[in-house]
Image (spheres, coloured by chain):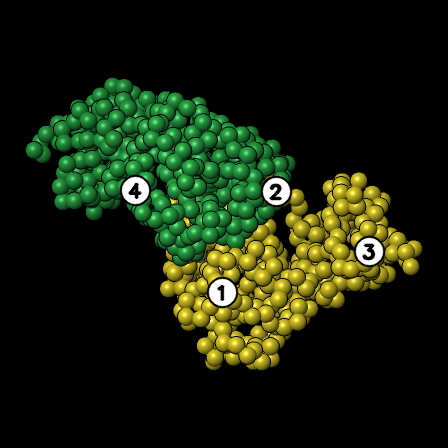
Chain colours: A green, B yellow
Amino acid sequence: MSGNDLLLKAFKQTKYQLSGHGVRDIQTLKKAFEHYRDEQESDMYGKGKIIEEFQEKMANYLGKESAVFFPSGTMAQQIALRIWCDRKELKKVAYHPLCHLEIHEQDGLKKLHHIEPILLADKDSVIQLEDIVNMKEEIACLLLELPQREIGGQLPDSKTLESISSYCREKGIKLHLDGARLFEILPFYQKSAAEICALFDSVYVSFYKGIGGIAGAILAGEKDFIEESKIWKRRHGGDLISLYPYIVSADYYFNQRIHKMVQYFEEAKELAHLFNQCNMVSTRPIEPVSNMFHVHFSLPKEKMEPILADLYHETGIGLTSYVREIDSDECYYELSIGDQFADVPKEKLKQVFQLLDEKMREQQ
Amino acid sequence: MSGNDLLLKAFKQTKYQLSGHGVRDIQTLKKAFEHYRDEQESDMYGKGKIIEEFQEKMANYLGKESAVFFPSGTMAQQIALRIWCDRKELKKVAYHPLCHLEIHEQDGLKKLHHIEPILLADKDSVIQLEDIVNMKEEIACLLLELPQREIGGQLPDSKTLESISSYCREKGIKLHLDGARLFEILPFYQKSAAEICALFDSVYVSFYKGIGGIAGAILAGEKDFIEESKIWKRRHGGDLISLYPYIVSADYYFNQRIHKMVQYFEEAKELAHLFNQCNMVSTRPIEPVSNMFHVHFSLPKEKMEPILADLYHETGIGLTSYVREIDSDECYYELSIGDQFADVPKEKLKQVFQLLDEKMREQQ
């Protein structure tokens, strides 16, 4: 059996897992629909109570005039950038080198919209005001991802955010928020979603990260912007006759979990601390600013996989189903706190980190 | 109350309806999931048992090497045409003037893919071989919609289909099937889906027309074509983390209804005959070739709406929730036979057509 398979198999046999909300199975959908009236009519190509009410709820929550439900963030964000580019008649935007649009979308932004991105900041840092001020080229829109997922979920401080927002407004640059994990960062900033979103012209949020829904996204902004995005939603093939399977579950799990974001954040800090006390283990960031962080092991992937698998067998606790290679001496995985962490007995937690520390020491 | 609202309200109060499978409500989803194991894991960005098994099932059914599930036909078809255009390095296709891509997609094909369509045939007829032979311009792909929905669901005969397919192969033109209603036309051609699809290079089918699922589509063709379409699916924002709400329901209702297509076809012919016996009422086509047809009334919309509303009140049977204006003397609606027709008592059916005929005579 390969190291990948060995680790995945061992993970699936564990009783407790440190991160996430649990397996993404059919039950996720069934639970959301359990208390929903059978007679509730489907949405119909973006119209109807079921979609309109949720859109209005999210527009209010995000403090924006209007909102529209999209099947995916990939679609929502490309469209947001396209609209801002069209308005300025300039097909240039700027974002982080590890932006979702740059590394996970098969170049949809370039292939479908012919928009050229300027990559800002070093890939290991978040975008700062000077990165924007020093930019040589004119752009229509700047995209900020909060938190910057691919580097463990890092954030600029409030002051930086505010100064970037002011600068963009002054220069006529539209500011778009990739808020895939917006709900998860509110406890760190100690601000409401509306307060954060007020700094941005358009905002995307996702419902299957911290919220744990099935799929789907909201794009929010001014009314004319949202109306235009609906036309593009149809062009992309996202104006489905029925989106309610995603809407009902988004709404259900939003209500279930939006108040748990403070808890997830506190637990992430507690857990990162435990990792950082182990030999040859460190988290990125050292102190989390949301419910997520990356765990780095100073060992090659091939060595780390059997160590973790053994740890799972001995403790019944699963840390991760995979590790990714960074180089021949280091590997890492991504962790997001969800409902499962609270279920892990504290004694068990202590045991697993003691054992991890021992196993890593043996490798030195 | 407007005529629109009056008719819709009266329709919603009827006990029986002549067409469709019934209201599109939450129950549609719940029913499909009822017997589905809770522990069945979600698909994950196009991978996993739940999506792979259904794709393979549909590839087999359609007689194609490979198939991929899409959230919408809009997305699937634009992508199919894009791939064929890219391969020939020629951004020109041909289709009917009332093709879905031309009239229902906000010009996605042009705005996202910069593909120019040549419109073939008069809008009131289906495409014939000579329309293609007489075409002055070179094209990469020809799209045929079977049946041609916007003109009541008309079809070319088998010989025409075969001759178009041979001609396209000879000339190096790729032939794409808009099979949104492919299942529904098999009884007319008395052929299997695979036999029809063998004439085409790529095929799209839908799961919320005759099948009555929630949403979703399959695109089928050769393996390399389908693999390429998956890259475009991600670019369009259609590669959702979970598509299972649509897949489970597509599979469930496919199994429930695929064998009923003969029944729907026979019932459509019976029902069209009843309409055509009424004064100032005619169907298009006169004799249906699938489960669908259009019903034309030789009266202005404003006059027809209260007549239908009265008919519903008096009989408890609903014909349609809307009529659309053609000109100041004529209006029409579209009808697709589903599960509901079989529930209408034969006596009631007789009564409603007698009464409709009388009411129309009074208008002369």
Same subunit, labels 4 and 2: the answer reads yes
Q: Amino acid at mark 3?
A: Pro
Circle 4 SS class: loop
- Give the alpha-carbon distance from disc 1 to disc 4, as whole Å: 39 Å
Find disc 2 in the rendering and name its residue.
Answer: A47
Quarter of the image where one finds residue B120 = bottom right
Callout 3–callout 4 Cβ contact below 8 Å: no
Label 3 marks which chain's residue?
A: B
Give the amino acid type for the residue marked by disc 2 in the picture. Answer: Lys
Task: Please tell me in which quadrant of the rendered image residue B186 appears.
Answer: bottom right
C-alpha span from label 1 to label 3: 39 Å
Q: Is residue A245 left or right of residue A346?
A: right
**In the rendered view of the protein, which quadrant contains the C terminus of chain A?**
top left
Residue under label 3: B300
Subunit of label 2: A
Judged from the image, the secondary structure of the residue bearing numbered disc 1 is loop
Dot 2 and dot 1 within a common chain: no
Chain letter for mark 1, please.
Answer: B
Q: Is residue B151 above or below residue A208?
A: below
Label number found at residue A134: 4
